[in-house]
Image (spheres, rainbow, N blue to C red):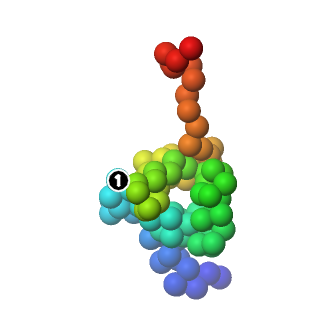
């Protein structure tokens, strides 16, 4: 039987709770907890461009796009930071 603390933590990172309480971006640490990953593993995935949702680098800060995190949690399909070349006007 899960402890009350783990049940509380699960609820804290449920899509409904995230949608209601998080802002437009989250820290890597918050996103790591939502995915059940360690902080160091998450930063390693960010560094390699393999974090499962959209990552913003703003100066020296790294933020996770909350809407992307929610889509990944709900669908199970990762959204990597890739460039969509279907609509590109570059030669």
Q: Quadrant of the N terminus?
A: bottom right
| Residue 16 in view of the camera | no
Q: Position of residue 64 (x, y in %)?
A: 47, 56
Q: Position of residue 68 (x, y in %)?
A: 48, 47
Residue in the image at 63% along x and 72% along y: 40
Q: Position of residue 73 (x, y in %)?
A: 55, 53
Quarter-of-image position of residue 63: bottom left
Decide if residue 17 is on the left or right side of residue 3. left
- Give the vertical position of 1 relative to 68 (above or below): below
Query: Could you tell me how many numbered marks the image carries?
Result: 1
Residue in the image at 55% along x and 80% along y: 6
Q: Position of residue 41 (x, y in %)?
A: 66, 68
| Residue 3 in view of the camera | yes
Give the residue at mark 1: 24
10 Å crowding of disc 1: few (<14), some (14-19), many (20+): few
Quarter-of-image position of residue 37: bottom right
Residue in the image at 57% along x and 23% along y: 85
Residue in the image at 50% along x and 51% along y: 55
- Give the vertical position of 1 relative to 86 (above or below): below
């Amino acid at each position: 039987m899960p402890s009350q603390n783990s049940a509380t933590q699960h609820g804290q990172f449920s899509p409904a709770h995230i949608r209601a309480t998080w802002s437009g971006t989250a820290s890597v640490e918050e996103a790591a907890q939502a995915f059940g990953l360690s902080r160091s593993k998450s930063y390693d995935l960010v560094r390699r461009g393999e974090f499962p949702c959209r990552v913003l680098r703003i100066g020296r800060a790294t933020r996770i796009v909350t809407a992307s995190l929610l889509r990944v949690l709900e669908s199970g399909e990762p959204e990597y930071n890739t460039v969509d070349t279907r609509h590109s006007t570059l030669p």
